[in-house]
Structure formats: C-alpha cells, structure tokens
Image: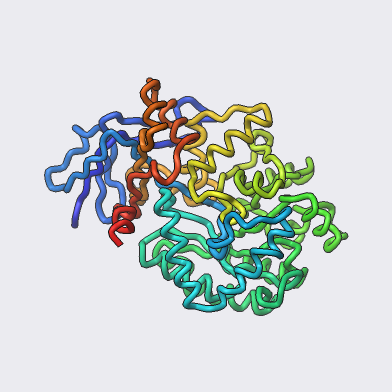
Amino acid sequence: MTKTILRGRVLSFHADPAETAESHHFWENGAILVEDGRILSVGDHAEVRDPEATEIDHRPHIIMAGFVDPHIHFPQVQVVAAWAAQLLDWLNDHTFPIEAQYRDPAHAARMAEAFLDQLLLNGTTTASAFCSVHRESAEALFAAAEARGMAMLAGKVMMDRNAPDAVLDTAQASYDDSRALIEKWHGRGRLEYVITPRFAITSTPEQLRAAQTLAAENPGLAIQTHLNENRAEIELTMQLYPEASDYLDIYDRFGLLGPRSLMGHAIHMNKREIARMAETGTRAIHCPTSNLFLGSGLFDDRGMRDAGIVTGVATDIGGGTSWSMLATLSEAYKIAQMRGERMHPFAAFHWATRGNALALGIEDRIGSVQPGRFADLVVLDPRATEVMRLRHDKVDSLMQELFILQVMGDDRAVVETYVAGRAMKATLAAN
C-alpha cells in the first residue's frame, strides 16, 4: 500500500462560516497523509510525517477539498458563449441542436473526455451533471468518470415534448432507459445516478409520473431539474400545468421534492414555494454566471438560507460562461453585492466545497479534508498571474488571499487537482 503526504498550507471546513466563526482549520505548514485514495490524517507537517510515505511539497500553495459542481450540463461543452436573447431562445437556437449529436456513442465518448478534462483543469473533482436525452450520453459520461476514479452524479434527461424530435423520448422510454442506467451504474465505484426530468416544459404529466415511479422504486436517489429561472419560462410552464398553484407545486404533485432534490436556479420564488422547499428539505442551486448571461435574474441566497433552505453554487455550463468555480464565486459575490449583501471569502470557499457536498447529500465522502474522506483535493496559487502577484504583495491574511483567488482566479490558479489521491492536472498536461 502506497502512502503519500501532500504538504502545503492546508485549509478544511467543518462548518458553515455564515453560521459560526469556528468553521475551519488552517495549517500554515500542513500535511495530508493519503493511503488507497483516502485521507488517513491531516494536521501540522511535524505531526503527520510518515517515513514510509512519498512526500509531495506544494508550499507555499493552499490545499483544500476539491470543488464540487452541483448543476452542470454535460452535452453543452460546445454551447458556452452561444449568443441568444434569453433562456427559451437559447435552448431552441443552440442547445437542442447540439444535444441531438449525443445519440452518437463515439461523439458522446469524445465529449465526455473533454468535459472531464475541463472540470479537472479547473479544480472540480465532483459534479452533478445533466446528460442528453440519449442513453448513450450517460453511458459515455459514467464510463469516462469511472476510468478516472471520480465521484460523479449524472442522469439522462427525460424530455417528451416541446423540443425537436431528435432530443425527445417518451414517458415509457425515459423510464426504461433510466431504470437500465440505474441498474448498471448507480453505486458502481464512485458513481451515482440522478433522476433527471429536464424541466416541466419538456415533460408531460405522464413523464413526471414516470420520474415519480423511479424515485419510489429507488428511494434515496437524487433528483435534479430546473425551477423558476426565467419569467417567460414560468409563464409557459403555468400554461402547461394550469392546475398547479405555482411552478414548485408541479414537482410537488409528482413527489419530486425532498432533501436530495436539486432545483437549479430558483430565482423568481413566491413565499409559498420558499416555505414548501424549506419544509421538504429541497435544495436550491445558484447558477450565477448563467443567470447573468441569460438575463434571468438575481438569486436570493440570504433569503433562502434565512428560510432554512440548503443552497449550492454551480457553473451551469453551458448557460454558464466559465468552467471555473473561482470565476463562479466571483459572480456570486457580485450578485450578493447587488442585493445589498456581503459574501465573506471563507463562506464562498465553504460553499464551493463542503457546502455543495452538503447540498448533494454526500458530505460524508467529500467536501472537506478529514480522515476517512476521499482525497479529492485542489492546490491553489493566489499568486498565479502577474496581476494576482501585484495584489498579493499587499495582503496580510488568509482571508485576503482567498478573496484574490475568488475575484481574480481561474484555471491558471489551479496548480494541481487530486482525485482519490491521484494527481490529475499533471497527467492531462502530459497527454
């Protein structure tokens, strides 16, 4: 059994900084002892030293848990920066035609490699991904993630109306394909299947009942979809489901709410929806770069948290405009500023690591640097570029270093990404 010590300035969160000042541990001369993909111990280097371990010295860089992305679209690798008016135009003009190509297994396999490359280059070690409607797309992503040893959550989208034929299935086909994928991939290695009705506009009541059946047959599986992203989307949704009291009520009527239900966007919420999300434990996922790019609106994170709702923060590639969780946190900070709120850098980095793991319900495995967790880690350099170095010369605290990373950082600030203790960025560069 090979042991490795990763030495550096180690930061780990064990609580939310928004709730307590005692939220994290930081070791200036820290070390993480890794064996068989998991963390054995963490602390000061002098205490963690092991003569049998191979040591990798990342000083003076910061080592923390790898980023977790709780809302991202695998088939939209080539959709980023596609010009359109707003959400529905963007889907019809760009997204659906490109997603149609994922019925080809060879294309899906190529794009799965590109998708995972970009995640790892940006320090993201786990994601919850929407695949295309085609079973082949989910097969490709799961196979590629398994080969890299990644913790990956994903599901084929269920869509049986209001889109081109090339990206539609039926209620029965979506059930059959999802069930087959669950049986083959869920719980295999570090993989997890997510029941994925795209959103109410593209699913008939019959298909949402199929999703409900899948959830009942597989208790504990995560569910992901979209909610209250765009005013025109909401208007059309309510025309399609006039019996519902609001958008959230549609999913509620089909038993799709709960602690493992992930509602992407959740911007234009009414009081009843907020109360019901809190009551059921349903998660709200903030997608800041996407919401700004498509002009959708400003997510109310403080309001959600005050109501008792667990939130996550995500890139939402390809409506989102950056693969970088650092860039995503930067835009989330600006949205908070526009709402008259402040986001502390500790809160931001907790959100992108342990916070997102909590939102996904997998915080017992990833999201913090603790013994027993998988050694999914990112090494960050707050002096990665010339302008960052200039700014860094004037900082005197870890908080300020993190804020440099948050506001000025991107993939260049990611020195290395580890998946289960294996260095991935250096491998990608070598290839």
Q: Quadrant of residue 79?
A: bottom right
Q: Image point 59% across, 54% down: which residue?
A: 81
Looking at the picture, tell me which residue is in the foreground, 106 or 136. 106
Indicate whether 395 appears above or below 238: above
State left or right for residue 31 relative to residue 330: left
State left or right for residue 253 relative to residue 394: right
Q: Image point 27% across, 46% down: which residue?
A: 40
Does the image show residue 214? no
Does the image show residue 430? yes
- Quadrant occupied by the N terminus: bottom left
State left or right for residue 107 relative to residue 300: left
Looking at the picture, tell me which residue is in the foreground, 264 or 372. 264
State left or right for residue 181 relative to residue 397: right
Looking at the picture, tell me which residue is in the foreground, 181 or 413. 413
Instruction: Give how far across and how far down residue 205 sits, in percent.
Output: 77, 68
Q: Image point 58% across, 73% down: which residue?
A: 178
Figure disc tally: 0
Instruction: Give how far across and how far down residue 35 sits, in percent.
Output: 25, 52
Q: Quadrant of residue 91?
A: bottom right
Q: How is the image coloured?
A: rainbow
Indicate whether 83 appears above or below 39: below
Q: Image point 70% across, 77% down: which residue?
A: 165
Instruction: Give how far across and how far down residue 316 sits, in percent.
Output: 58, 53
- Quadrant occupied by the C terminus: bottom left
Instruction: Give how far across and how far down residue 102 sits, in percent.
Output: 56, 73
